[in-house]
């Protein structure tokens, strides 16, 4: 699908910009300007910061994955849309965390991060498969390398989510 690449870039960048905009709208607003409200505001800003860094990192990885492509295949398009769908749920997870930092909410936040990373990995494999069509023997080598790299990040997410059971706040 030629000509789709620039539209996919613009669409993805637009979705990610909207995600960040919605997340910042969930930062707690001060009403009475008490010490407790300022503490809640700082906690809310920290949660937003963590979410912002997560989304910004995924945007950067997305740019690196898609950047060298001249055209987009259907599997790449579908995997990109699935990645964006699950990423677009980040404002929901962020809002839940800003409202109450309970054990279950921290775990849901962590599980969401893992799911989004799974779909980014699927996108990466779709792009890799499309790029290596002319050299099919190369695909398994790169797939294995990408899997090892992805597993490092996934294990870190699992460990951090597991820590939520011990230290939820």
Image (cartoon, rainbow, N blue to C red):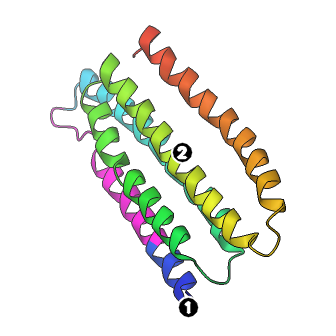
Looking at the image, can residue 60 be seen?
A: no
What label does residue 162 carry, if any? none
Work out whether residue 105 or residue 44 is closer to the camera in this orientation and state it. Answer: 105
Query: Residue at label 1?
Result: 3
The quadrant the C terminus occupies is: top left
Label 2 element class = helix
Q: Is residue 25 magenta?
A: yes
**In the image, what residue occupies the spot 56% across and 54% down?**
122
Q: Is residue 47 left or right of residue 125?
A: left
Work out whether residue 105 or residue 79 is closer to the camera in this orientation and state it. Answer: 79
> Does residue 17 lie above or below 43 as drawn?
below
Write down the region rendered in magenta.
12-32
Residue 153 place in picture, x, y as percent: 65, 36
Residue 41 place in picture, x, y as percent: 32, 33
Query: Residue at label 2?
Result: 117
Circle 1 crowding by C-alpha within 10 Å: few under 14, some 14–19, many from 20: few
Label 1 element class = loop
Residue 49 place in picture, x, y as percent: 47, 41
Task: Verify CB contact (< 8 Å) between mark 2 and mark 1.
Answer: no
Residue 161 place in picture, x, y as percent: 48, 23
């Amino acid at each position: 699908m030629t000509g789709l690449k620039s539209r996919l870039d613009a669409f993805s960048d637009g979705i990610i910009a909207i995600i960040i905009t919605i997340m910042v709208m969930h930062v707690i607003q001060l009403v009475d300007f008490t010490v407790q409200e300022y503490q809640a505001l700082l906690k809310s800003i920290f949660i937003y910061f963590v979410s912002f860094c997560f989304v910004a990192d995924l945007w950067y990885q997305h740019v690196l994955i898609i950047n060298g492509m001249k055209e987009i295949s259907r599997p790449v398009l579908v995997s990109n849309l699935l990645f964006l769908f699950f990423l677009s749920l980040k404002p929901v997870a962020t809002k839940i965390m800003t409202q109450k930092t309970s054990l279950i909410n921290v775990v849901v936040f962590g599980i969401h991060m893992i799911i989004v990373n799974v779909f980014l990995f699927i996108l990466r494999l779709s792009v890799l498969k499309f790029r290596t069509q002319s050299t099919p023997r190369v695909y398994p080598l790169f797939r294995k390398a990408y899997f090892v790299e992805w597993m490092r990040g996934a294990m870190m997410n699992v460990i951090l989510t597991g820590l939520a059971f011990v230290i939820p706040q």
